[in-house]
Amino acid sequence: MDTKRQIVPKPLWKKYWFVMPFAVMIIATFMLKNVLGNASFVVEMNELVTATVEQGDFRVNVRASGLLKPLNIRWVSAQVSGRVEQVNFKPGAMVHEGDVLIELSDPDLQRELEKSSWELKAIEAENFAALVGLESQMVDLENSVVEAELSYQMVKLKLNAETLLMEQGNATVSALDYQKSQLAVKQKIQYWQAQQQKVDKMKANMKASKTAQQARLGLVDNNYRRVTEQVEALQVKATMDGVIQQVSLELGERVKVGDSVALIADQQALFAELQVQEVKIRNILIGQSVVIDTRISLIKGKVIRIDPAVVGGMVQVDVELLSKLPAEVRPDLTIDGLIETSNIENTLFVKRPAFAAGHQQTGLYKLTNDQEFAHKKMVSLGESSVNQIQIISGLSVGDQIIISDTSAWQEHKEIMIN
């Protein structure tokens, strides 16, 4: 016989169990809504970097790195061949013009100098002997001229006396003797004139001989001077005051004519070589102000040259240094430079947010007054400087924005700051 089952009704809480979790979820959502507002992402405050929008003069700068270079730099080269006997200075040493940097040796040059010296003395002695001989001949000729003149004067006096007697009709002088006296006078005057011509010819000969001797002596003397200069050039000397940057030779090394010996730079006259990105060079002009940072001191300068070529995406800009150089500067010192390309008066600007570029619109997160939320706003940016950027529209003076990396929550319009 079947027993009738008694149906026991389910409790309401078991029948509608899902109502309670749903109600809790609604209450939690409502409470979370009150806390988060419209925010869909939560960020920790200590993870953020913020900045305040300012108004005033905005200096647009371009940052570039580079090196200090000497204005006056000179290679000292060997003027003669030789072997290095001694190196007197090392790189970094301060030298003055005329200091002996390196001493070379060449026995052949020394022997050639001695030979040239003896040749010069020999030719000088020969010239002196030849000159004495010519002068002696000149003295003899001049004496002959004097004797010829005296002889002429004597016969001339005799002729004059005989002429006077002949005019007076004195028969003491015969016509034959008178004619002989006339012939003697003609003969003596011709002899005198001939001796004078010999003296003139001798003077011309002496002058030509002296010229030839001087030419020969000059040739030997020039050779002696050349060899002397070559021997002196075995001592390689500094050609300017400065600091030795490099010494190219070692003891015992053989040097040829024209080989580089040492590099000297004037450490008191430097300029800066900056490497500027090619996309930023369009804003740089000759004469713009520059601040050079040595990481210890700041030096004022101005742009004096812009290289026309682009090398590896960089353009070289030369900067003249206007301030007194501090003690730490030296050639090839690594530096940074800030080139002031423009100055925009009375504009809005802020510290540049991460990944923000000039002349574009971008979404920036503006903080509320209580700094509990941040709302994304579209902002128009203008000129970009090293650490700051111009605000064209979208923000006002005093607004605070997030400038750290926001790429992790860019899709959220509003975030909560915890």
Image: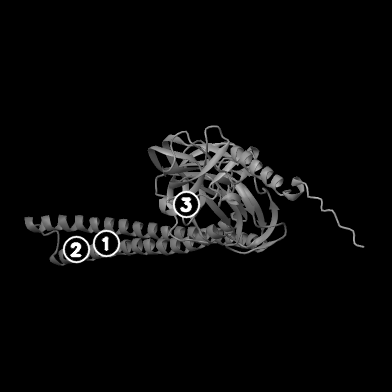
- Can I make out residue 70 in this image? no
Q: As drawn, is 177 to the left or to the right of 96?
A: left
Q: Quadrant of residue 170?
A: bottom left
Q: Which mark sits nearer the N-terminus, 1 or 2?
A: 2
Nearer-the-camera pick, 155 or 34: 34
* Disc 1 versus disc 2: nearer the observer: 1
Badge 1: residue crowd in 10 Å (few <14, some 14–19, many ≥20): many
* Disc 1 versus disc 3: nearer the observer: 3
Report the disc number at residue 192: 1
Q: Amino acid at mark 3?
A: Val
> The C terminus is located in which quarter?
top right
User: Circle 3 sits on which residue?
Assistant: 317
Nearer-the-camera pick, 178 or 237: 237
Which type of secondary structure does the marked residue at label 1 adopt?
helix
- Can I make out residue 110 in this image? yes
Badge 2: residue crowd in 10 Å (few <14, some 14–19, many ≥20): many
Alpha-carbon span between mark 2 and mark 3: 103 Å
Name the spot of residue 216 as percent of width and height, x first. 47, 64
